[in-house]
Image (tube, helix red, strand yellow):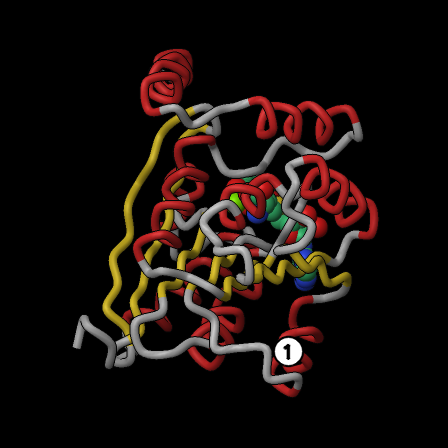
Amino acid sequence: MQATWSSVEEYLVEKVGAADAALSEALRNSAASGLPAIQVAPNEGKLLMMLALLTGARRILEIGALGGYSAVWLARALPADGVLITLECNERHAAVARDNVARAGLSDRVEIRLGAALEILPILEREGRGPFDLIFIDADKQSNAEYFDWAIRLGRPGSVIVVDNVVRSGAVVDAETADESVRGVRRFLDRLATEPRVIATALQTVGSKGYDGFAIAILRGGGAG
Ligand code: SAH
Ligand code: DHB
Ligand code: MG
């Protein structure tokens, strides 16, 4: 099925216009720099941009920048005075992200913070950088539950939280798994299940990256009640 998933993705990406010169350039540059090709698929990137547009996002937080591919998508939804703060602990990844964001003409809207997310998040809070209208969680899966708690803390009523990679080829249903990433995803979903402050759903996806999925949550108290 993988070949079909990839060709259908390619077909849909062309039909919905989820690729252009700047994005392709970012992917080429990331690959040439030796980064793993684990960025969001183009159609997921475009969904992120659309969610940011729907929420009228002016402040976006991303956890896990890699080469800045999803950051370019998200930052494109921002008004000229908007800001995306993206957290990245790998210096080489952060450098490539900085380069790709600059090439996409978005440096004025994107702030890349180098360091471990769990160390930077409290700093962002102290600096009063929130509340964030949209938070995209896409770093080490072990800490997803903690990132989710921070997203709630740094959000506001109506904020959207997207958590990537919650299916992991179906491994997510294995309660006995020794895989720390899968355990992290399950711990996050357990948190989600008992969290009264959000309205949430989770979707399975197939495509060039195989079989995975993402969760979306809205913080209560906004239009969603
Ligand atoms: N959002 C990117 C993909 C991110 S891949 C995109 O779709 O384009 C995950 C990234 O999270 C990697 O670059 C990895 O270095 C980073 N990361 C892993 N653990 C982290 C941590 N504790 N703090 C900050 N970044 C982390
Ligand atoms: C991995 C991380 C991701 O963010 C992703 O979208 C796919 C895979 C990983 O660490 O394997
Ligand atoms: Mg991901």
Q: Secondary structure at mark 1?
A: helix
Residue 63 vs residue 26, the one in the foreground: 26
Task: Spot the residue most to the bottom.
Answer: 126
Q: Quadrant of the N terminus?
A: top left
Q: Judge the density around disc 1: few (<14), some (14-19), many (≥20) Cα neighbours within 10 Å.
A: some
Residue depicted at x 65% and y 87% = 126
Horizontal arrangement in the rendering, residue 122 relative to residue 198 (left or right)? right
| Picture quadrant where residue 92 is located | top right
Q: Amino acid at mark 1?
A: Leu
Asked which quadrant contains residue 10, the reply is: top left
Residue 127 location, quadrant: bottom right
Which residue is identified by label 1? 124
Among all residues in the image, which is located at the extreme left? Answer: 225
Q: Is residue 206 left or right of residue 76?
A: left
Check the image and name the residue furthest to the front: 80
Q: Quadrant of the C terminus?
A: bottom left
Residue 96 screen position, x and y as percent:
77, 40
User: Which residue corresponds to the image point at 25% horizontal and 80% vertical from the top-left?
Assistant: 196
Q: Is residue 160 left or right of residue 113?
A: left
Residue at x-position 38% and y-position 21% = 9
Residue in view at x 28 percent, y 52 percent: 202
Does the numbered disc 1 mark a residue whose Cβ is under 8 Å from ligand 1? no
- Residue 85: x percent and y percent? 61, 62
- For residue 169, side relative to residue 65 (left or right): left
Instruction: State the image coordinates of residue 151 (x, y, percent, origin top left).
Output: 47, 72
Seen from the viewer's position, the closer of residues 223 and 118 is: 223
